[in-house]
Image: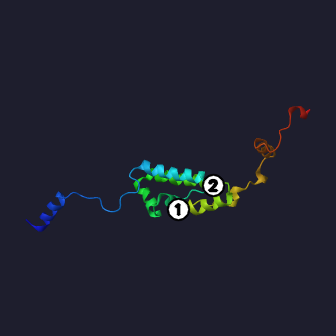
Amino acid sequence: MSSKVLKREARDGMIKKAMGRPRRWLTEEAFQKEFMAYIEMCLGAEPKRIPNIAGFCIFADIIREIYYKQEQIYPESYAKTRLCLEDQTINLKDTIRSIFLLKSVFNYRDSDAPASMLTVNYNNIADNQLQSWLKDAKLIQAPNDDDED
């Protein structure tokens, strides 16, 4: 027999061992539970902490790359954690910090709509149409039917 055949037979008879570092979370539920524990810790802390990826990594005693690898291992849970962090950022009481974090972390951006689309050309609006819009928005009070007499 050739050496290639012997090597293949030896390789096929071997039990394959798992290579590399073991997973931090063996199940998706464990990953979700640890993340929820982190969120509860942030919300219960005094002063309140803003949940973020770096904070979760410290809480879970992992490096940032391990967290990012969860996207391939548990894609649905990873997406949920990102949505949760985004939701916590949106609901910050500090609006300026919220806007900054949304733009830098979650790639929010200002509208690209041209200014002409954001403004109303009042020259092309019928007289009664503007009054109707203002009434609908409750910016002006509709006249009573009794006042017309």
Q: Earlier in the sequence, mark 2 or mark 1?
A: 2
Of the 4 image quadrants, the one containing the C terminus is top right
- Point out residue 89 in the picture as x, y percentages from the top left corner: 60, 55
Helix, strand or loop for disc 1: helix
Q: Residue furthest left?
A: 1
69 sits to left or right of 1: right
Q: Amino acid at mark 1?
A: Ala
The quadrant in which residue 141 appears is: top right
Residues 42 and 149: in front is 42
112 sits to left or right of 149: left
Using a 10 Å C-alpha cutoff, classify the residue at mark 2 as few (fewer than 14 neighbours), some (14 to 19) or many (20 or more).
few
- Point out residue 52 in the picture as x, y percentages from the top left corner: 55, 58
Q: Amino acid at mark 2?
A: Glu
Between the residue at mark 2 and the residue at mark 1, the CA separation in whole angstroms equals 19 Å
Residue under pointer 1: 54
- Point out residue 16 in the picture as x, y percentages from the top left corner: 24, 58
- Point out residue 50 in the picture as x, y percentages from the top left corner: 60, 57
Using a 10 Å C-alpha cutoff, classify the residue at mark 1 as few (fewer than 14 neighbours), some (14 to 19) or many (20 or more).
few
Residues 112 and 80: in front is 80
Q: Residue, x 33% and y 63% (percent of image)? A: 20
From the viewer's perspective, is residue 34 above or below residue 148? below
Q: Which mark is residue 46?
A: 2
Q: Which mark is residue 42?
A: none
Helix, strand or loop for disc 2: loop
Q: Residue, x 56% and y 50% (percent of image)? A: 40
The quadrant in which residue 99 appears is: bottom right
